[in-house]
Image (tube, grey):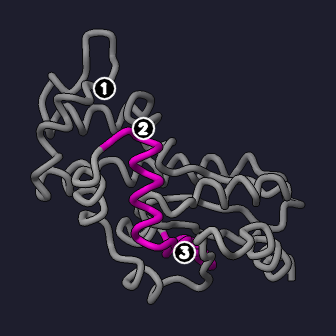
Amino acid sequence: MLKIGITGGIGSGKSTVCRIFETLGIPVFYADVVAKQVMIADPVLIAGIKETFGLDSYTAEGRLNTKYIAQIVFNDTTELAKLNALVHPATFRAFDAWLLTIPAHVPYILKEAALLFESGSYQLCDQSILVTAPRATKLQRVIARDGVTEEQVLARMDKQMSDEQKAAMANFMVTNDESRSLILQVLDLHNQFLK
């Protein structure tokens, strides 16, 4: 079974592309969603976060204290790197466990991850897809979706690898510029992966 990584910058529409693949019967592992889940479910990860960032990292009820963690990592790349070094391996473990649940007849799966290249998880995939969109389009989408300011979106964009950097590492590209059909682009890739 082929493992295809799929990524894209904030507002690129990678989740929309993944949903199209899902309508074709392709299982999708949403690494970013799972990363949040393992932070409250993986005992090894929880212990590591508490040891690294302190017992205040979790509430008395066992929930992640997101405000506390955000204050530590948001503007400190060293602290963010520490958090990622704990979360990424736990997410990889969850991915391996998820793969065991996929029936043998499935021709390929997708692993959706915002930090596919940054985390190194693209190396665990056979191929990779980059979803791109014009910067102005991405800005508009995120402002509308998250109710945030342009400055906040730009700050998040600036923390990610550029599309140009990702394109140099990706095997395939999907352009989500609202002028080309996403469905046709996905169908073309789907047919290539089935071969």
Q: Which residue is disc 3 drawn over?
A: 130
**Magenta-colored stretch includes residue 136:** yes
Crowd tier of the residue under label 3, counting other residues whose Cα lies within 10 Å: few below 14, some 14–19, many 20 or above: many
Q: Residue visible at 86% across and 83% down?
A: 195
Q: Earlier in the sequence, mark 1 or mark 3?
A: 1
- Dot 1 amino acid type: Leu
Q: Residue visible at 74% across and 53% down?
A: 27
Residue contact at pointers 2 and 1, CB within 8 angstroms: yes
**Magenta-colored stretch includes residue 44:** no
Q: Secondary structure at mark 3?
A: strand
Q: Which residue is disc 2 drawn over?
A: 36
Q: Residue visible at 35% across and 76% down?
A: 162
81 relative to 89 in the view: left or right: left
Single out the residue that lies furthest toward the top: 60
Q: Which residue is disc 1 drawn over?
A: 64
Q: Which residues are magenta?
A: 122-148
- Dot 2 amino acid type: Lys
Q: Earlier in the sequence, mark 3 or mark 2?
A: 2
